[in-house]
């Protein structure tokens, strides 16, 4: 299935109101779904000897273990998938004694994908991998000016990346 994209216009420098407006592509809103643990478990069940319930419990246990290890300050490396690690935001202060853990305002989890985890644009690669991504430019409904598809034809054959 192709990923549906649309054109939209925004300023090159979004913080500068005098910046030049350029066209970009984005995935069309409301065209992607969410795959939850139940769907993943059912899909994984087809490829192994475990039931969907067993797979679901393994995934839930994995999430708990990841959370526990991140809370302990460790990085979690999932081979062939990537590494998760904790980051935090701390405002700067002038005096050393004023720099305490109370200055931490946000804690985030970052994901760095493994080098082997790649998506390949099918229009620029001649591989038949399951990681190929095909894009289709959305055609706006005739007579409408919405959809951000101004300034060009919206043909399906158009390469959205070049």
Image (tube, helix red, strand yellow):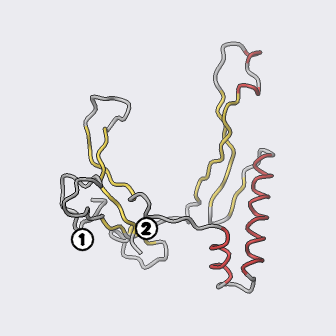
Where does label 1 land, which residue? 157
Residue count near mark 1 (Cα–Cα under 10 Å), binned few <14, some 14–19, many ≥20: few
Instruction: Determine contact: label 2, label 1, CB under 8 Å.
Output: no
Q: Quadrant of residue 57?
A: bottom right
Mark closest to the chain's N terminus, 2 or 1: 2
Q: Which residue is rendered at x = 71% and y = 25% of the image?
A: 103
* Image position of 20 (left or right of 33): left
Residue 113: x %, y % from top left: 58, 58
* Image position of 39 (left or right of 3): right
Nearer the observer, 126 or 34: 34
Q: Which residue is rendered at x = 43% and y = 79% of the image?
A: 128
Q: Check the image and name the residue furthest to the front.
A: 143
Q: Which residue is rendered at x = 64% and y = 73% of the image?
A: 40
Nearer the observer, 56 or 133: 56
Where disc 2 sits, the SS reads strand
- What quarter of the picture does the N terminus occupy? bottom left
In the depicted structure, whether residue 94 falls above or below residue 20? above
* Image position of 75 (left or right of 40): right
- What quarter of the picture does the C terminus occupy? bottom left
Residue 67: x %, y % from top left: 76, 53
Mark sitting on residue 115: none
Q: Quadrant of residue 158?
A: bottom left
* Image position of 127 (left or right of 160): right
Where does label 2 land, which residue? 120
Residue count near mark 2 (Cα–Cα under 10 Å), binned few <14, some 14–19, many ≥20: some
Where disc 1 sits, the SS reads loop
Q: Which residue is rendered at x = 59% and y = 60% of the image?
A: 114
């Amino acid at each position: 299935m192709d990923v549906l994209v649309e054109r939209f216009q925004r300023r090159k420098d979004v913080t500068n109101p005098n910046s030049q407006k350029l066209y970009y592509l984005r995935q069309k809103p409301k065209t992607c779904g969410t795959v939850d643990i139940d769907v993943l478990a059912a899909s994984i069940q087809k490829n192994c000897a475990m039931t969907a319930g067993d797979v679901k419990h393994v995934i839930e246990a994995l999430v708990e273990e990841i959370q526990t290890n991140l809370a302990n300050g460790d990085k979690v490396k999932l081979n062939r998938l990537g590494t998760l690690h904790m980051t935090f935001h701390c405002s700067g202060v002038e005096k050393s004694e004023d720099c305490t853990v109370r200055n931490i305002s946000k804690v985030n989890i970052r994901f760095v994908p493994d080098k082997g985890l790649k998506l390949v644009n099918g229009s620029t690669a001649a591989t038949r991998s399951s990681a190929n991504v095909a894009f289709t430019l959305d055609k706006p409904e005739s007579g409408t000016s919405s959809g951000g598809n101004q300034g060009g034809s919206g043909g399906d054959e158009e390469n959205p990346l070049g």
